[in-house]
Every structure is written in C-alpha cells, then in structure tokens.
Image (spheres, rainbow, N blue to C red):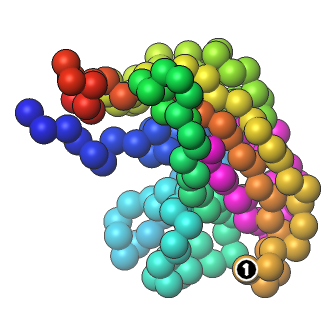
C-alpha cells in the first residue's frame, strides 16, 4: 500500500485546535455556517486565503496557519516543524482568549503531545512527541486586513510518521 501524503502534523493540530476552541466555547461553529455550502466552515485556514473565503469570514474572527520545516535531529525518524497561527479579530479580548487557550493547551510539551495522541480523531499514522509554544507576538493592528487586530502564536512540534521496513512513510 502506498503512503498517504495528505497526512500532515499541521492538519492534525488544526483539527484538534478547531475542536478545542469549540469545546471551550471560544468559537461557535454556528457563527461560521454557510447557507451556500450547507455546513459550517472551519475558520482556521491555510495561508493562501481564497478570495471566496472573504464572503464567509467577513468581519469574523479567524486564524491563518502555515508551517516551516526545521532541520532534523540526529534521529531522522523525528520530524521537527514550526507552525505559525495568526489570529485575526476585531475584538482584542477575543484574540487574547484564543491566545490564552492555545498557550494553555500547547505549553506542556510532552503532555500536550500526549493529549493529541489520545484524541479520538487524530490519524493513527502520526505520533506526536512534543508540542510547545515557541513564541507569541503582541496584538497589533493587522497590516493585511483593515479594521482587524492580529497576533501570532508559533508552535514547535516534534512528531513521527509510522514507517515501513525501509524507513519510508507507511
């Protein structure tokens, strides 16, 4: 069987974060319901926003994400990445609540990874070893979106993919 290259630590953390923000009552999925699509849109979206997303997220709090691969350690089985989440909102307090949630959820290194590994919706092809908050920027007026404020949260993630006998992704 060939490997599924769609599996990515970033996507697993995105799913986990979206569920966590809803469970903590910080974001209400109903606020992102689209009549056109007949479902709620996940407001945690990739860095290359589509223009069509503006109609669904206009004036609403949302998070843009991207990742940076880091050099591998001596153990090449451990993948190292930094994930950048930029929180956009017109409400300073809302940014602060989301930032505080992310700090609380992801500051615990091994325990943060454990929580993700035990989460029922995480892929069984990924094993997280460590997640921690590498940096948090101050909230400031957004340069990209007029009328919005923005703050960055950078996570450092160490994880493994399940591999075959040759060390390739299974």
- Residue 107 image offset from top left, x and y in percent: 75, 27
- Residue 68 image offset from top left, x and y in percent: 58, 52
Q: Is residue 157 left or right of residue 98?
A: left
Rendered residue at 71%/46% (across/down)? 154
Q: Is residue 85 magenta?
A: yes
Rendered residue at 65%/15% (across/down)? 111
Rendered residue at 53%/34% (across/down)? 72
How many marks do you count on the picture?
1
Viewport quadrant of the N terminus: top left
Specify few, some or many for label 1: CA neighbours under 10 Å numbering under 14, 14-19, or 20 or more: few
Residue placed farthest to the front in the image?
74
Residue 64, by quadrant, is bottom right
Q: Please name whichever residue, 122 or 33, is drawn nearer the observer in this view of the structure.
A: 122
Q: Please name whichever residue, 157 or 149, is drawn nearer the observer in this view of the structure.
A: 157
Which residues, given as a range, are shown in magenta?
82-102
Q: Is residue 122 left or right of residue 158?
A: left
- Residue 4 image offset from top left, x and y in percent: 23, 41
Q: Is residue 92 magenta?
A: yes
* In the image, residue 160 above or below residue 60: above
- Residue 20 image offset from top left, x and y in percent: 60, 36
Q: Please name whichever residue, 95 or 151, is drawn nearer the observer in this view of the structure.
A: 151
Q: Is residue 21 left or right of residue 7?
A: right
Question: For mark 1, what is the residue?
Answer: 144
Is there any visible trace of residue 16 in the rendered image?
no
């Amino acid at each position: 069987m060939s490997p599924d290259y769609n599996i990515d630590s970033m996507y697993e953390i995105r799913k986990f974060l979206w569920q966590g923000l809803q469970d903590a009552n910080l974001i209400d999925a109903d606020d992102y319901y689209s009549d056109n699509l007949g479902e709620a849109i996940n407001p945690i979206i990739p860095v290359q926003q589509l223009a069509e997303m503006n109609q669904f997220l206009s004036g609403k709090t949302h998070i843009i994400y991207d990742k940076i691969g880091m050099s591998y350690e001596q153990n090449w089985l451990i993948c190292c990445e930094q994930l950048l989440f930029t929180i956009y909102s017109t409400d300073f307090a809302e940014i602060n609540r989301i930032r505080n949630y992310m700090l609380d959820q992801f500051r615990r290194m091994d325990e943060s990874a454990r929580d993700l590994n035990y989460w029922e919706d995480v892929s069984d092809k990924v094993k997280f070893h460590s997640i921690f908050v590498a940096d948090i920027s101050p909230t400031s007026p957004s340069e990209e979106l007029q009328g919005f404020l923005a703050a960055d949260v950078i996570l450092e993630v160490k994880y493994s993919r399940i591999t075959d006998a040759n060390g390739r992704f299974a």
